[in-house]
Each structure stands twice: as C-alpha cells, then as structure tokens.
Image (cartoon, rainbow, N blue to C red):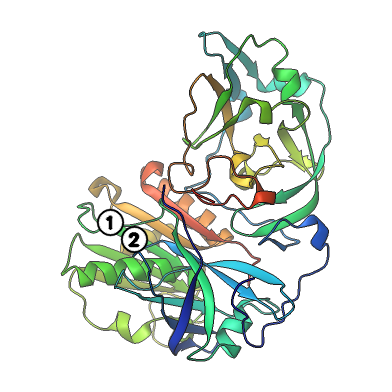
C-alpha cells in the first residue's frame, strides 16, 4: 500500500470487481487522440491485411459491412485511468477476416488513416477477442471515436483499439507502434496494470 | 529499461489561479526531469487501502526536483477537490512520471509554435512557454487562449508580463471585457489566423483543452492549411476529476 493521503476517502467503489487496478468508473465517453480527427469517406475507405509473404487481402466498405457481424458488449479501460462498462458495438470479428489469411506470423502492426499505429500479438486478435467495429450503441461510429471503423480489442488498454483503422500488417518481428515507442507498455494488459514501459 | 516508480511528493506551497483552480508546487526527490507538455500520474490512498489515480499535466519546466501542477476542481470529482481543497503544505501524495512523449516541445526546436488552449488546457502549454523563457528564448511562440471570461485565466499576471517572442491573444466564450473588439463567442478560424502563424511558416501547433474545443480548433487549423501531421492534440475528457 502507498502513502496514506490524509483525509482522503475516495468515492467510486461501485463495480470495483470490474475495474482493473488504478481505474475509475466513468459514464461518459472521453476522447483521446494524438492529433486531429481524420475524416474518411466510406466510398474511399478500405481495410487490408498484409501477410508476411506479401499476400494482401482487401475489403471495401460495402464488402466489410456485408460480412456477418457480431454485437459485442464489452468494458473499456483507458490507460488514462477511466473505465466504461457495458459498451455495445457492432462489427466483424477478426476471426472472419483472418479466415483466408495464410500466415504464421506472431506479430501484428495495426495502421490507421491519420498515421496512427499500434502493435499486438496476432493471437490477441483471434478467437473472439477482437473486432473491426462500425456501430456504437446502435449508431454509426462517430469520427471522434474512430469512425467509420475502429479496431476493438477490449482486453487490452484502449490505445490498442486503434481508431480509423486501415489495415493490419503481419510481421515475423515485433514492431512497436505510436504509443509503444513513446514510453507506453508494449502489451498493455489493464488487469496487470501494464501502463508504461517496465510496468 | 526505464521504469516509472512511485515517489513521495511533498506539497511545498499553493497559488490560487482562479476561484476553481489551484497551482500546487511539489518537491519530488529523485525526479528525473521532464519535457514541457508531459504529465504525471498522481495516486491517492485512503486509510482502508482504497487507492485511485489521475493524470495531471505539468505546468513548470524541468527544474530539479520541483514540479508544479495546476488542478481545476471538477464538481463532484473524486480527486481534484481533494488536491485543491484538502491537501496542505507538508502533505504527501504519490507520483510517477514523466508520462507522454508526443505532446511535447523540445528546447532547440526551430519551427515557430502556435499554442491553442481551451480552459485548463493551458497547463501543458504553459510548461512550454516557461521552458522557452528559461532557455533564454527560442522560436517565436503565439498563444491563443480561450476561456469563459477574463477571470478564468490561469497565470494571468505572468502572461501579461512582457516575454519577448511570445504573443498572447485571448478568446472569451461567454463574457468579454468592456470595450473589447471581439464579442464573446466560440473560437473561430479568424481568431486562429490572427493570433497564430500562417500555415506557410510551417509552425508546430499544440492544441489542448476539452474534447469539443480540441476537435473544433484542430479542424479549424487544418482548414487554414496547417499540416495535420504538425497539429498535436491533447484532450481532456468531460470526465475526470
């Protein structure tokens, strides 16, 4: 336990079982981005998966949204300490998108409209753990929250759930992304409080 | 590997910036220094072991083992009312950092700088202004500072003093001073054009404030021709505290 803060009692202990260490509950939906919000018209949008052997799979907006979708309800944990419970989304499971991908790569680098990148192990994208989502709470995903589509990987801190997602590069060697090269943790498990490098 | 460890920070003194915001000056033994624009995590622990954390931007330039935070009290907040109303000189809180390697200004950078602050978004920008001054100058800075009314300005006296190479203009959203040429209202492209640098000077732009303000101001900057890659943003959610 740390230093006791004289006279501090704290308040937000509701739902403590669902809050990772150091997180507090919020009911609104804060926005964190490193730069301006890109505006990506869906008629020019595409999503790609580049395998390590040079093979590229490509989906247009119409193709992506025609795929079978799921409606995950998940908790979000942002490294800036807020958590939001029971958020509902619609999107395509990465398992569907990876069906025709021939790859043995263990590392993925997500890249986005606007230039953002983030890395994670391929296994964290599969087996029902990740989606490309395009609706939030029954509405089209707003640009400030990553629309038209973002990655959703709710078991990791939210910076891994890249907004304005454009594609995934599969790599034999791990390649740190934007925040991962700026002092944040390479993996980012909220339950192990992996906020920063060395945590 | 660099590792951020929790350290005990002792409050040395406080200064009220506005009726709802207070600057807290801490002594932080072992602090490794920071870049202007970075923030620090603060952890409070209750007697029963419950603890909670928040991030706060650092207002001071790197200067030994002293750091200054300016905390705006969030109504119904869990942490900010404690920091601004309960914490007294001599008390300790835990901190670790510095955090954030993107929204930073590095002394020695040569590009002119446009700073756009909304409300308490001035805090990390003030660290940049102070670092430039402490460095004996640098590229020219232009600050456009939007607050509700003149009484909500942080660091008002300091910003009113002459600082060669720093130009400051104000945007008041609710109440402008009498005789002011600009009526109260939300920041506009004209405010950013008049108070900032033209895009062809290729300035580095830093925008910090509440989410709605940052979204709006960043879009206006891009509309004025600024390269999105040179517009760095930091947003304070409507939550927090």
Left-right relation of A12 to A115: right
Is there CB contact under 8 Å for labels 1 and 2? Answer: yes
Q: Residue at x 59, y 38 (%)?
A: A162
Snapshot quadrant of residue B23? bottom left
Q: Earlier in the sequence, mark 1 or mark 2?
A: 2
Q: Is residue B117 above or below residue A107?
A: below
Left-right relation of A67 to B110: right
Q: Residue at x 31, y 69 (%)?
A: B62
Distance between the alpha carbons at the discs numbered 1 and 2:
7 Å
Q: Secondary structure at mark 2?
A: loop
Q: Residue B187: in sight, yes or no?
A: no
Badge number at residue B35: 2
Pointer 1 and pointer 2 on the same chain: yes
Q: Is residue A57 above or below residue B238?
A: above
For the C terminus of chain B, the image quarter is: bottom right
Snapshot quadrant of residue A82? bottom right
Residue B79 or residue B236, whichever sits in front: B79
Q: Which residue is mark 1?
A: B106
Q: Residue A147: in sight, yes or no?
A: yes
Q: Chain of mark 1?
A: B
Question: Where's residue A166, x and y in %?
Answer: 57, 28
Question: Where's residue A109, x and y in %?
Answer: 53, 28
Question: Where's residue B101, x and y in %?
Answer: 40, 52
Q: Secondary structure at mark 1?
A: loop
């Amino acid at each position: 336990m740390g230093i006791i803060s004289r006279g501090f009692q704290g308040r937000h202990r509701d739902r403590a079982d669902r809050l990772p260490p150091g997180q507090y509950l919020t009911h609104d939906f804060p926005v964190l981005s490193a730069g301006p919000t890109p505006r990506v018209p869906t008629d020019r949008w595409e999503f790609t998966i580049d395998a390590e052997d040079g093979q590229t799979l490509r989906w247009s907006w119409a193709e992506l949204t025609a795929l079978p979708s799921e409606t995950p309800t998940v908790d979000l944990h942002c490294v800036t300490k807020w958590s939001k419970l029971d958020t509902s989304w619609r999107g395509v499971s990465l398992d569907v998108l990876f069906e025709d991908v021939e790859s043995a790569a263990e590392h993925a680098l997500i890249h986005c409209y606007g230039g953002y990148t983030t890395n994670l192990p391929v296994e964290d994208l599969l087996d029902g753990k990740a989606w490309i989502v395009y609706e939030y709470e029954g509405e089209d995903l707003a640009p400030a929250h990553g629309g038209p589509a973002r990655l959703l990987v709710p078991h990791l801190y939210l910076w891994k759930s890249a907004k304005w997602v454009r594609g995934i590069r599969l790599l034999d060697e791990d390649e740190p992304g934007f925040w991962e090269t700026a002092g944040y943790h390479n993996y980012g498990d909220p339950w192990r409080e992996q906020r920063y490098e060395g945590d | 590997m660099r590792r951020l460890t929790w350290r005990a920070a002792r409050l040395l003194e406080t200064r009220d910036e506005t009726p709802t915001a207070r600057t807290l000056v801490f002594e932080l033994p072992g602090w490794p220094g920071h870049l202007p624009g970075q923030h620090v995590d603060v952890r409070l622990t209750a007697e029963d072991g419950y603890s909670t954390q928040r991030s706060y931007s650092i207002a001071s330039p790197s200067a030994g083992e002293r750091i200054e935070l300016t905390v705006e009290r969030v109504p119904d907040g869990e942490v900010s009312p404690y920091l601004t109303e309960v914490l007294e000189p001599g008390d300790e809180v835990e901190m670790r950092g510095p955090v954030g390697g993107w929204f930073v200004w590095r002394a020695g950078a040569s590009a002119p700088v446009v700073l756009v602050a909304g409300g308490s978004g001035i805090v990390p920008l003030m660290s940049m202004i102070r670092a430039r001054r402490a460095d004996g100058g640098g590229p020219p800075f232009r600050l456009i500072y939007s607050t509700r009314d003149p009484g909500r300005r942080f660091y008002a006296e300091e910003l009113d003093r002459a600082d060669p190479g720093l130009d400051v203009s104000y945007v008041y959203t609710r109440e402008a001073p009498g005789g002011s040429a600009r009526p109260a209202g939300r920041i506009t492209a004209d405010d950013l054009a008049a108070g900032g640098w033209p895009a062809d000077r290729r300035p580095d732009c830093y925008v910090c404030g509440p989410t709605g303000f940052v979204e709006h101001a960043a879009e206006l900057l891009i509309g004025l021709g600024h390269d999105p890659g040179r517009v760095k943003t930091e947003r304070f959610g409507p939550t927090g505290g």
